[in-house]
Image: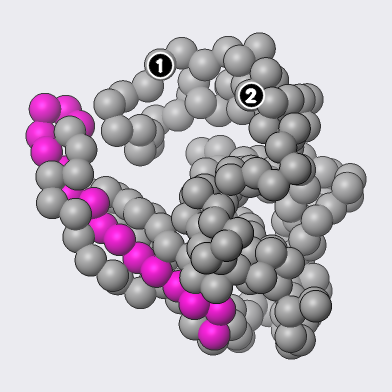
Amino acid sequence: MRNPLVVGSRVYLRALETNDAETDAAQANAETETFMYRGRAPASPLAFARWIEEDGKHPMPSEIHLAVCLRDGDRYIGAVSLHHVDYLNRTAETGSGLADGFRNQGFGTEAKMLLLEYAFDRLHLHAIHSHVFEHNTRSAAALRKQGYRYAGRRKWDDVKGGVYRDGLLFDLLREEWLAAREAWRATLPADVRGKGLGRDREPTP
């Protein structure tokens, strides 16, 4: 592992590095299940490298993007993010995305649990929210598995393919995430259940 921030049984989170830009661009250009609202534009490694470099300059960033890496081989497979971080009211919005070959294998759930541990126990955030479009049933199901509750709907939130789409809103408190994490951990094999998947502890002061 290289510069890990939060460690799980199979993946860990670290800060994004400019060396990740090549992979970012390749993943973006190969994406087939895109959730971008109005389609995709070509992505370049140079643009991603510039964005990563600028992203790391803020002492109290409103956007926090963390690389998801496999513990076995240190391979970078995607990213998880905190958006609109409000340090005064202690809220943020979460986002995530993995390369196509690593979906539906449990990596995304583990990475999101690690992101929520970072948000609640490191940054001491009080409430997290997330937003998905109504047709994105896969992401909505993943949020519910992670403890999020359905919080409402924004009608005609955006246009895709010439059709207006509603946005579904979800929210999450720390105690709800802790319960969801324990339920998820109970489904894991006994030999990995306690490996870097968070400790039963109060947040660090």
Q: Which residues are magenta?
A: 160-175
Secondary structure type for disc 2: helix
Q: Residue furthest front?
A: 88
Neighbor class of circle 2 (other Cα within 10 Å; few <14, some 14-19, many 20+) is few
Q: Is residue 164 magenta?
A: yes
Q: CA–CA distance between discs 1 and 2?
A: 16 Å
Q: Residue at x 54, y 56 (%)?
A: 86
Q: Residue at x 69, y 26 (%)?
A: 54
Q: Quadrant of residue 101?
A: top right
Residue 145: percent from left, percent from top? 44, 72
Q: Residue at x 52, y 48 (%)?
A: 83
Is residue 84 shown left or right of residue 7?
A: left
Q: Is residue 34 above or below residue 85?
A: above
Q: Position of residue 117 (x, y in %)?
A: 67, 69
180 in magenta: no
The image quarter containing residue 190 is: bottom right
Name which residue lies at 52% across and 65% down: 89
Q: Is residue 41 above or below residue 39?
A: above
Mark nearer the N terminus (1 vs 2): 1
Residue 34 appears anywhere in the view: yes
- The one nearer the camera, 102 or 78, is 78
* Residue closest to the eye, 97 or 167: 167
Indicate the amino acid at tag 2. Answer: Trp
Q: Which residue is mark 1?
A: 41
Q: Amino acid at mark 1?
A: Ala
Determine whether, in the image, residue 187 is placed left or right of residue 50: left
Residue 51 is labelled as: 2
Question: Helix, strand or loop at disc 1?
Answer: loop
Label 1 packing within 10 angstroms: few (<14), some (14-19), many (20+): few
Residue 38 drawn above or below residue 3: above
